[in-house]
Structure formats: C-alpha cells, structure tokens
Image (tube, grey):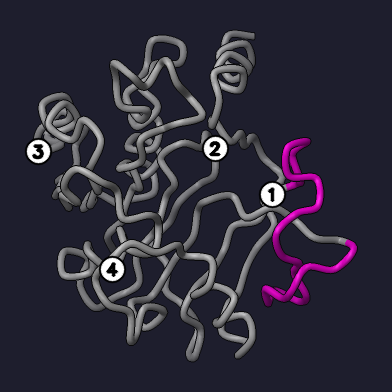
Amino acid sequence: MKAMILAAGRGERMRPLTDEIPKPLLRVNGVPLIEYHLRALVRGGIRDIVINLAWMGARMRDFLGDGAKYGVKITYSDEGAEALETGGGIVRALPLLGDASFWLVNGDVFCDYHYSLRSLASGIVGHLVMVPNPSHNSGGDFSLEHGTVIRPLANALTYSGIAVLHPDLFAGSVDGKFPLAPLLNAAIDRGALSGEFFAGRWLDVGTPERLAELERVLSA
C-alpha cells in the first residue's frame, strides 16, 4: 500500500516562517513536521510514499532524498512553480500511486494516528479520519452515521486531513488546479464515503501560533 503526503503548498498563513523554508520542513522539538508523518507511516508498514512538490520543491528533495534514511521509498510529484491544490495535486500524482487505495496525509497536521495496511469496502471510494472540532473550525466539516460520512449535522466533526482514497474518487477529473472538497461532497451524496472517529492527539499546524502550541504540547 502506498501513501501520499501533501507538501506542495506555499504556507501563506505560516509566513514569514515559510518565506525561507517549506512548511513541511519547519521543526517541532527539533524534528521537521514531515518526519513525524514518515515515522508514523513506517510504523504502520507503509514504506512507498509519494510527496508532491511546488514551493521550494528542490529544497524538499535535497533534504528528504530518496527516503532511504527513513526506511522508505520516496517518489516526487512535481507541480512546478504553483501548487495545484489538494484535488489537482492528487490527480497529478495518480500515475505514481497506481490503481489501489492509498493513504492521504495532509503535511501540515500533526497526529498520532496509527496507520495500517487497509482496503476499502466494495463501492466505497474514500475513508476519512475525523477528529473533534478545534476552535478554528468549531462547526465541523462532516458527520458520521454508522461509519458513513454524511452532510454535517449538529454533531459534525472535523476532517483530519488523513484519509484512505481510491483512484475511482477522481474518475473524470482532469489535470489542473482544483480542491478535493467537491469530490468528497459528491462521494457523500452517493453514499460512497466511510469514516471513523479518532480521539487521539491531532493539531492543524497552519499558523505560527499553532506551531508554537504543538512545540509546547510535545515538550511537556
């Protein structure tokens, strides 16, 4: 099973820190954010990893190399000067990911979720890991009903940025810049998206303040 780590974004909300370094290489407790993801994937038996690149992509390549120092094989999906957003980035990388389900990991979250080698049920094109709503997303994104992701209700949860996706989710999509959300919504409408609730440690590291918060949490 393969995984894709989304790492191409400019990190506008993280500026000025990301003016000099790509966001996935920002350090927490002395460790680059993306390293936490690589270590977690290895613990789950996932060692074939695709990483998309745009902003400071050469610096990412130089730092991570082929992944051997982490015990993984890294393949890069280069998006050029401008990132293609989440949906477009995945579509660009599909030839590298193959025909089977793969893990998707948003590079700017921190989570102690336990990955595993897993497949999707018949007719299901995605499986989302959902977490309690943080203060900056108090209304949540989607709800869960008996393991199926549905439109948000009063008990909505936040999509963690971690998922198992099948290439069929992207059927009919063309190469270009677009978000993932409309494809997830379409899958919800046809009952093709499953999910699970994760109550462990998770943080969206999207701003300098949240980066500092994660530093405090991991240093405690």
Residues tagged 2 and 1 counted as in contact (Cβ below 8 A):
yes
Q: Residue at x 46, y 80 (%)?
A: 125
Distance between the alpha carbons at the discs numbered 2 and 4: 25 Å
Q: Main secondary structure of the magenta part?
A: loop
Does residue 171 appear to the left or right of 59 in the view shown? right
Span shown in magenta: 132-154
Residue 131 shows which numbered tag? 1
The residue wearing badge 2 is 111
173 or 215, nearer to the observer: 173
Crowding near the residue tagged with mark 3, few <14, some 14–19, many ≥20 C-alpha atoms within 10 Å = some
The residue wearing badge 4 is 91
Name the amino acid type tagged 2: Cys
Does residue 157 appear to the left or right of 68 in the view shown? right
Element at label 4: helix
- Snapshot quadrant of residue 113: top right
Name the amino acid type tagged 3: Asp
Q: Position of residue 72 (x, y in %)?
A: 19, 42
Q: Earlier in the sequence, mark 2 or mark 1?
A: 2
Residue 66 shows which numbered tag? 3
Residues tagged 2 and 3 counted as in contact (Cβ below 8 A):
no
Residue 153 among magenta residues: yes
- Snapshot quadrant of residue 97: bottom left
Name the amino acid type tagged 1: Val
Q: Position of residue 61 (x, y in %)?
A: 13, 33
Distance between the alpha carbons at the discs numbered 1 and 3: 32 Å
Distance between the alpha carbons at the discs numbered 4 and 1: 26 Å
Residue 161 among magenta residues: no
